[in-house]
Image (cartoon, rainbow, N blue to C red):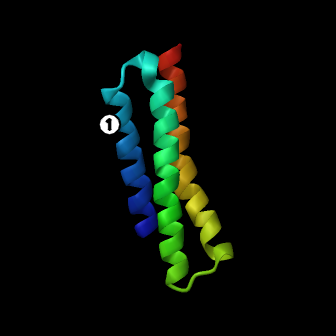
Amino acid sequence: MRTLIFIVVGLLLVGIAMWLTRPGKRRVAAVVFSAGWLAVVLWNLRTGMSHGYSLQEELPIQAVIYFMPVAMAWWLARKAAH
Protein backbone atom coordinates (compact mmCIF):
# COMPACT_ATOMS: atom_id res chain seq x y z
CA MET A 1 0.00 0.00 0.00
CA ARG A 2 2.86 2.38 0.84
CA THR A 3 4.35 1.79 -2.61
CA LEU A 4 1.09 2.68 -4.31
CA ILE A 5 0.77 5.83 -2.21
CA PHE A 6 4.27 6.97 -3.18
CA ILE A 7 3.62 6.32 -6.87
CA VAL A 8 0.29 8.19 -6.81
CA VAL A 9 1.79 11.13 -4.92
CA GLY A 10 4.67 11.25 -7.40
CA LEU A 11 2.31 11.25 -10.36
CA LEU A 12 0.18 13.98 -8.76
CA LEU A 13 3.27 16.10 -8.12
CA VAL A 14 4.37 15.65 -11.74
CA GLY A 15 0.95 16.69 -12.95
CA ILE A 16 0.93 19.78 -10.78
CA ALA A 17 4.51 20.71 -11.73
CA MET A 18 3.81 20.38 -15.45
CA TRP A 19 0.50 22.21 -15.18
CA LEU A 20 2.19 25.16 -13.42
CA THR A 21 5.14 25.28 -15.83
CA ARG A 22 5.12 26.92 -19.26
CA PRO A 23 5.59 24.42 -22.10
CA GLY A 24 9.00 25.84 -22.97
CA LYS A 25 10.30 25.26 -19.44
CA ARG A 26 8.95 21.76 -18.87
CA ARG A 27 12.30 20.08 -19.51
CA VAL A 28 13.77 22.13 -16.70
CA ALA A 29 10.82 21.16 -14.52
CA ALA A 30 11.42 17.50 -15.39
CA VAL A 31 15.09 17.77 -14.37
CA VAL A 32 14.21 19.48 -11.08
CA PHE A 33 11.45 16.95 -10.38
CA SER A 34 13.76 14.02 -11.17
CA ALA A 35 16.37 15.26 -8.70
CA GLY A 36 13.83 16.04 -5.99
CA TRP A 37 12.02 12.75 -6.45
CA LEU A 38 15.34 10.90 -6.22
CA ALA A 39 15.87 12.49 -2.80
CA VAL A 40 12.41 11.34 -1.70
CA VAL A 41 13.03 7.80 -2.96
CA LEU A 42 16.43 7.62 -1.26
CA TRP A 43 14.80 8.72 2.00
CA ASN A 44 12.16 6.01 1.54
CA LEU A 45 14.89 3.45 0.80
CA ARG A 46 16.72 4.41 3.99
CA THR A 47 13.48 4.14 5.95
CA GLY A 48 12.77 0.67 4.58
CA MET A 49 16.27 -0.52 5.35
CA SER A 50 16.08 0.88 8.88
CA HIS A 51 12.99 -1.30 9.39
CA GLY A 52 14.94 -4.45 8.61
CA TYR A 53 14.56 -4.85 4.84
CA SER A 54 17.70 -5.53 2.84
CA LEU A 55 18.91 -3.44 -0.09
CA GLN A 56 18.18 -6.40 -2.35
CA GLU A 57 14.53 -6.39 -1.23
CA GLU A 58 14.09 -2.63 -1.35
CA LEU A 59 15.87 -1.72 -4.58
CA PRO A 60 13.31 -3.09 -7.09
CA ILE A 61 10.45 -1.43 -5.23
CA GLN A 62 12.26 1.90 -5.02
CA ALA A 63 13.12 1.70 -8.71
CA VAL A 64 9.42 1.44 -9.57
CA ILE A 65 8.57 4.28 -7.18
CA TYR A 66 11.23 6.43 -8.85
CA PHE A 67 10.86 5.58 -12.52
CA MET A 68 7.08 5.74 -12.91
CA PRO A 69 6.68 9.44 -11.98
CA VAL A 70 9.99 10.41 -13.61
CA ALA A 71 9.00 8.67 -16.85
CA MET A 72 5.70 10.56 -16.76
CA ALA A 73 7.55 13.86 -16.19
CA TRP A 74 9.83 13.32 -19.16
CA TRP A 75 6.98 12.12 -21.36
CA LEU A 76 4.97 15.25 -20.55
CA ALA A 77 8.02 17.46 -21.09
CA ARG A 78 8.68 15.85 -24.46
CA LYS A 79 5.02 16.10 -25.43
CA ALA A 80 5.03 19.83 -24.64
CA ALA A 81 8.14 20.36 -26.77
CA HIS A 82 6.39 19.07 -29.91
Q: How many marks?
A: 1
Q: Residue furthest right?
A: 56
Q: Where residue 14 appears, x then y in whole percent?
A: 40, 40
Residue at horizontal 35 percent and vertical 45 percent from the top: 12
Q: Tell me if residue 18 comes above or below residue 13 in the rendering.
A: above
Q: Nearer the viewer, residue 51 or 67?
A: 51
Check disc 1 and report its element: helix, strand or loop.
helix
Question: Of the residues shown, which amino acid type is indicated by label 1?
Answer: Ile
Q: Where residue 10 appears, x then y in whole percent?
A: 41, 49
Q: Nearer the viewer, residue 27 or 64?
A: 27
Q: Where residue 77 appears, x then y in whole percent?
A: 50, 26
Q: Nearer the viewer, residue 56 or 33?
A: 33
Residue at horizontal 48 percent and vertical 65 percent from the top: 43
Residue at horizontal 68 percent and vertical 74 percent from the top: 56
Q: Where residue 23 appears, x then y in whole percent?
A: 41, 18
Quadrant the N terminus occupies: bottom left
Q: Residue furthest bottom?
A: 52
Q: Nearer the viewer, residue 80 or 48?
A: 48
Residue at horizontal 52 percent and vertical 43 percent from the top: 34
Q: Residue furthest top?
A: 82
Which residue bears the numbered disc 1? Answer: 16
Q: Residues within 10 Å of mark 1 (few under 14, many from 20)?
A: few
Q: Tell me if residue 9 comes above or below residue 19 in the rendering.
A: below
